[in-house]
Amino acid sequence: MSSKNDRHLAVDSDQQDRETLSSRMTFRHKVVLPFVWTIGECATVGYYFAIGSPSKWLILAQCCVSVTLICWLFCPLKKVEIQGGQLYISNYLREIEVNISEIVRIDETTWLPMHPIRIFFERETDFGQNIVFMPELRAWGYFRSHPTATRLRSAIDAAFWDD
């Protein structure tokens, strides 16, 4: 006799078999950092306006630029897992499943410390035609391909040759 709890255990065991490609720090970079940064910048601007500083407009402009940059870099990050021939992509509110054979291209930005990897799909997904994720951080990895990107490219090659 199967119960509701048995179904949850089956789903949990499926998720345990997945290999996580994105960094454990993704949630902190995607949600916590932009929130804390924005609060800090707003507090700074509020302080400069409260004391009537002559540089308050410069501080406001700097705040707008820095918050925009932080949100542009970190808010689009996704959590990415792989299992078999499927990618599981999450924005922490919902998750989608995309077949690896639908990947057209993988780009890396090797000069940024977070080394974002962008995946382009042949069709539009619920998260758009491309997504970006942050692999595990590594020391001294500048200007070289990240092992996670190499792993993903190998999985794409295997899916291509299996078809």
Image (tube, rainbow, N blue to C red):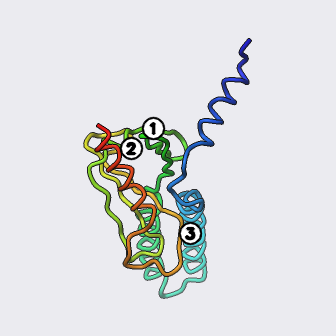
Q: Secondary structure at mark 3?
A: helix
Q: Quadrant of the C terminus?
A: top left
Image coordinates of residue 91 in percent, x first then y, are 50, 47
| Disc 2 + disc 1, Cβ < 8 Å | yes
Q: Residue furthest bottom?
A: 54
Residue found farthest to the top: 1
**Does residue 3 lie above or below 32 as drawn?**
above
Extreme residue in the front direction: 162
* Amino acid of disc 1: Ile
Q: Nearer the viewer, mark 2 or mark 1?
A: 1
Secondary structure under badge 1?
A: strand
Residue at horizontal 55%, vertical 72%? Answer: 41
> Upstream in the sequence, badge 1 or badge 3?
3
Of 78 and 107, nearer the camera is: 107
N-term-proximal mark, 2 vs 1: 1
- Which residue is drawn at the image coordinates 74% and 11% (left, top)? 1
Residue behind mark 2: 127
Task: Write the residue at 54% across / 52% down.
Answer: 20
Question: Which mark is nearer the camera, 2 or 3?
Answer: 2
Question: Is the Cβ of the residue at disc 1 closer than 8 Å to that at disc 3?
Answer: no
Question: Toward which corner of the image does residue 105 lie, by quadrant?
Answer: bottom left
Of residues 91 and 153, the one nearer the viewer is: 153
Q: Which residue is mark 3?
A: 37
Q: Residue at x 47, y 75 (%)?
A: 113
Indicate the secondary structure of the residue bearing disc 2: loop
The residues tagged by marks 1 and 3 sit, at their Cα atoms, a distance apart of 29 Å
Q: Which residue is mark 1?
A: 96
**Circle 1 Cα neighbour tier, 10 Å, few/some/many (<14 / 14–19 / ≥20):** some
Q: Amino acid at mark 2?
A: Phe
Specify the amino acid type for callout 3. Answer: Trp
